[in-house]
Image (cartoon, rainbow, N blue to C red):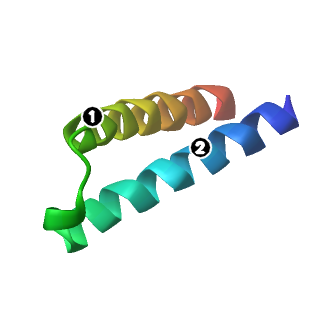
Amino acid sequence: MKNTHKILLIVLVILNIMVLLGQIIPQAAPPFANTVNIIFLIASLIYFISLLVKKK
C-alpha cells in the first residue's frame, strides 16, 4: 500500500509541475493544459480526502 501512495504522490507532483509551468509561461502551455488542471485538482482532492478519512 505504501508504494501506491508514493506512485500517486509522484503523479500529483508531475501534474503540479505542469500546472505551475502553465501558469508561469501561459504561451508555452500545451492545448490540453485545461484538462491537466482539472485532473490535478480532482486527483488532489480525492487524495487529501482519503488521507483525512484514514486518519480517523
19 or 31: nearer the viewer: 31
The residue wearing badge 1 is 38
At 48% from the left edge and 30% from the top edge, which residue is drawn?
Answer: 49
Kindly identify the residue that appears in the image at 26 percent across and 49 percent down: 30
- Labels in figure, total: 2
First in residue order: circle 2 vs circle 1 = 2
Quadrant (top left/top right/bottom left/bottom right) for the N terminus: top right
Q: Quadrant of residue 16?
A: bottom left
Q: In this view, does 53 lie above or below 10?
A: above
Amino acid marked by disc 2: Val
Please indicate whether residue 6 sits to the left or right of residue 30 in the image.
right
Across and down, in percent, residue 35 comes to 26, 33
Q: Which amino acid does label 1 sit on?
A: Ile
Which residue bears the numbered disc 2?
11
Residue 14, position as x, y percentages in the image: 53, 53
Residue 36's place in the image compared with 42, above or below, is below
Image point 44% across, 39% down: which residue?
A: 44
Q: Is residue 5 left or right of residue 51?
A: right
Q: Which residue is drawn at 53% across and 46% down?
A: 12
Mark 1 nearby-residue class (10 Å; few <14, some 14–19, many ≥20): few
Q: How far apart are marks 2 and 1 (CA)?
A: 14 Å
